[in-house]
Image (cartoon, coloured by chain):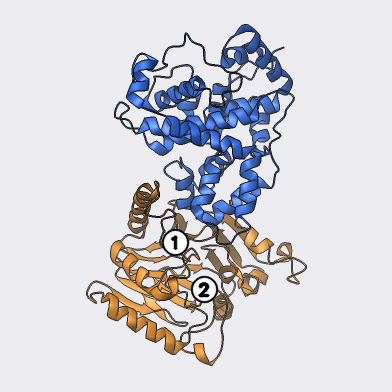
Amino acid sequence: MKVRFWGVRGSIPVPGENTRRYGGNTTCIEIRTDGGALIILDAGTGIYQLAQSLLTELPVSANVFITHSHWDHIHGLPFFIPIFVPGCSVNIYGAHDIVASTGIERVMDVQMQYSYFPVREAELKARMQYEDVQPGVPVTIADATVTPVMLNHPVVDFGYRIECNGKSVFFTGDHEPHQNIYRPEDEGFDAYRQMIEARTADINRAIGNVDLLIADSSYTVKEYETRVGWGHGTLDSSVQMALASGAKRLACTHHEPTRSDDELEKVFSEMLARARPDPNDLEVFLAREGLEITL
Amino acid sequence: MTTAIAIDHQAPAQQRLVRAVEKMPAFPKAVQQVLALCRDINCPPRDLVGVIEHDPVLTVKLLRVINSASYGLPNKVTSVNQAVLFLGINTVKNLALAFAMIGVLPTRNVAGFEVQGYLVHSVATAALARHLATRPQVGEVAADDAYIAGLLHDFGKVVMATHFPEEYRSVLEAAEAEGLPLHVVERRIIGADHAEVGAMLARHWQFSANLVSCIGNHHASPDADALTACVALANQLTRRAAVGNGRHKFRDDELPVTLRFGSEFSSIDIALGSLDSIWSSARAYAETAK
């Protein structure tokens, strides 16, 4: 199985001198199964460059798994060239929208409207299919399986565990470790803490000894103090998640858009000095555009 | 006149009830609080949970969407806090806002059903059921389950009063004139009682099995299991204390519905000690909810 990063930035694309080394595109990860099937995790602006790389192998069958419907994870979809190419098939998987009471097709329908885009969804040339997926229920894609896990964000977010021939990768999408909604002096504090511990253990079990964990590591610990509830993790919380779930490697992603390459490396090395993960147990690195990992 | 709600999922009357509840507005106090909290980007999640937990309609709707087939969660979500843990506070907030936008449940209805009395009775029963669940006589009952079951045990009443207002007025008048419990008269006039209707809806929405059976059995076999015993006794003690009990008055010859806490009310009173804080917070809620 091969994993390639096409977009590693959170919130908004930030091209320019300051982000040249790690890249300014929003989230998109390409996975190729051993048999060559194409799985795409999220459709941030990174998916545009990914689409360019597919032009030599058209028509393609693409399986796009959306972690959640916030713009930076879907705004590349209308520019995913295969949707306009007859003979291609594009299957989009994701969570049912519990507030709008609609399926995952909403991520296309809301973007491809007259006011916002010149082509309507109904006019696309590829064979488009949409499927709502459920937590804990694996989806088979050729020689791989993809299992959704419900995580914590201001909109429903599914992390995905992809397995192929004994190798595995887990991507969180956007995830903030659960926080207690009660104050220590409140009656409900202890009960909520126990619920969080049980839920966190369930999530770590679902991630389960992956060969590669790709985790939302948006903030530093200091930054997080003023961003509780925004739905993102820290570099430190990602290391904790990797250690608790038994992951072998950790790719930190969803870099803060305000962070330059130099600043990103600085906060990353500060975290390593603090957390000191044993390199025999866990290899930690920063995700960057163009990085390809063979598992 | 008999409306005859057969307790069968396919019956058209039930399908209509299910659809009607989906469009049913929540209580005025909770709607007003949800709208106020949702204007504040920094609204504390525990405040929103507190509002939802005091409103049977909001609670029912939240549990309905999260337990629906969309997410197929392996374990049923049985409390508002669990819903927040799974969905995140922002999703719960947006759901609550959507439910609040439907409008408010009218406090006056054709049936003459006292909406306010029902609400206060439900809130007090919920708090007392949670209190009973922590008592050593009970055994294994999750306090959160007891709270939700107490809050929702009479949900069938407000549904029937809202959707069969003419028939329900006859029920209320006959119960008053003949001095009979509501569920007995409901069965005679409407063909099903509020416990059966509540359980049917809870089952339809895939609520947890213990919640469904507690709602369904709170009159029929109140001592069937510990959860049902807690809710049935809380229901009875709340009526006895005349906290928001509306037309279903406590009769002096009633015996405790369960023996788990004692065979006479006098011994139960001693075992439980003062319940004044539960009654006073329910009454305080009633005052602000007007």
**Residue name at image x 42 percent, y 51 percent:** A136
Q: Give the farthest residue toward the right.
A: A114
Q: CA distance from mark 1 to mark 2?
A: 14 Å
Q: Position of residue B255 (x, y in %)?
A: 43, 12
Chain containing the residue with disc 2? A
Of residue A104 and residue A231, the one placed in the foreground of this image is A231
Q: Give the side of residue B144 with respect to residue B247, left or right.
A: left
Chain containing the residue with disc 1? A
Q: Is residue A55 above or below residue B121?
A: below
Indicate which disc, 1 or 2, sits on the residue closer to the N terminus: 2
Residue where numbered disc 1 is placed: A160
Q: Quadrant of the C terminus of chain B?
A: top right
Image quadrant assignment for residue A126 = bottom right
Colour of chain B in the rendered structure image: blue
Number of the label disc, if any, that sits on residue B287: none
Q: Quadrant of the N terminus of chain B?
A: top right
Image quadrant assignment for residue A283 = bottom left
Q: Amino acid at mark 2?
A: Thr
Which element is circle 1 on?
strand
Colour of chain A in the rendered structure image: orange
Q: Is residue B67 above or below residue B146?
A: below
Q: Amino acid at mark 1?
A: Tyr
Q: Is residue A102 visible?
A: no
**Residue name at image x 56 percent, y 13 percent:** B181
Number of the label disc, if any, that sits on residue A27: 2
**Residue name at image x 63 percent, y 62 percent:** A107
